[in-house]
Amino acid sequence: MAVRVRIVGVGMGPHQVTPEAADALRAADYAIAADKGPDDGLLAVRREIAAAHDLPVVAVPDPKRDRQPEGDGAYVGAVAHWHAARVAAYEAVLAERGGTAAFLVWGDPAFYDSTIRIVESIAARGVVEVEYDVLPGISALQLLAARSRIVLHDVGQPLHVTTGRLLAAAVAGGQTNIAVLLNRSVELDGLEDWTIWWGANLGAAGERLVSGRVGDVAEAVVAARDAAKAEAGWVMDLFLLRAPAPGQDDDGAA
Ligand SMILES: C[S@@+](CC[C@H](N)C(=O)[O-])C[C@H]1O[C@@H](n2cnc3c(N)ncnc32)[C@H](O)[C@@H]1O
């Protein structure tokens, strides 16, 4: 019989688990969660969410990832290697336990998360027969928009979603409305006249928000990032950057 896998977006914490996600968690036999070591704050949150839905957690030691790969394509190669190791680890748990397993995905599984790809890989290998579905969660992007009380784009305009590593390329490529996740730091040089809506640790301890003209608030962003980390012991942040409207001068006047 096929193992059932539910890939469940749990939003930005226990208070954002939707009723649909809660039903899926209650109906599952166990949760599989990556264990990144003693300081794994996200594992602690997953345990909290699982406990609230009477779901035992199978913590799987996370394979080590090369965080500083060198050379062209090395980043993608390092991530692929790490995914393969995770596939093998999770496949072993599913083969041993069977039943219905839940993966508790931070935010929404559709944004910068590998769980869907990993489960697809397990299904494709055919060692374990797997049936899976995906339940959405509230993403950090949505929470940034809500907390900042903004729409993520101007009327009828596009939104480009990228990572801190690829921000400079997005700007050079002509993007003018850019959401940026996965930041090691916040690099805003040359974007002084853009507008930023920045948020850290949204929905969690240390939550901070800063918005305004980049040239005016860049220092406040760095200070707030440090403060969030000092308060929570960790920091995750994202921001929306929007170029000045054509014809707008440095004072923001048309
Ligand atoms: C691996 S991605 C996962 C995104 C997630 N799947 C989602 O839907 O939000 C992690 C990145 O999401 C953003 N992020 C996640 N949680 C956040 C939070 N509570 N506050 C601010 N940014 C957050 C940060 O940019 C972080 O580096």
Image (cartoon, rainbow, N blue to C red):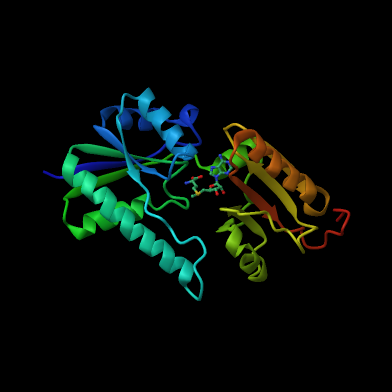
Front in this rendered view, residue 17 or 226: 226
Question: Quadrant of the image for the C terminus?
Answer: bottom right
Q: Is residue 171 left or right of residue 83?
A: right
* Residue 23 position (above or below residue 108): above
Location of residue 231 (image quadrant): top right
Which residue sits furthest bottom?
72
Q: Nearer the viewer, residue 62 or 164?
A: 62
Q: Quadrant of the N terminus?
A: top left
Q: Is 177 above or below relative to 47?
A: below
Q: Position of residue 151 (x, y in %)?
A: 63, 44
Question: How many numbered dots are placed on residues in this image?
Answer: 0
- Residue at (75% x, 44% y) in the render: 223
User: Measured from the top left, where is residue 18 in percent x and y?
Assistant: 42, 30
Residue shown at 49% from the left, 27% from the top: 15
Residue at 65%, 42% in the rendered image: 199
Q: Is 35 rendered above or below residue 73?
A: above
As rendered, which of 104 and 148 lies closer to the eye?
104
Q: Residue 241's spot in the image, x, y percent?
A: 68, 54
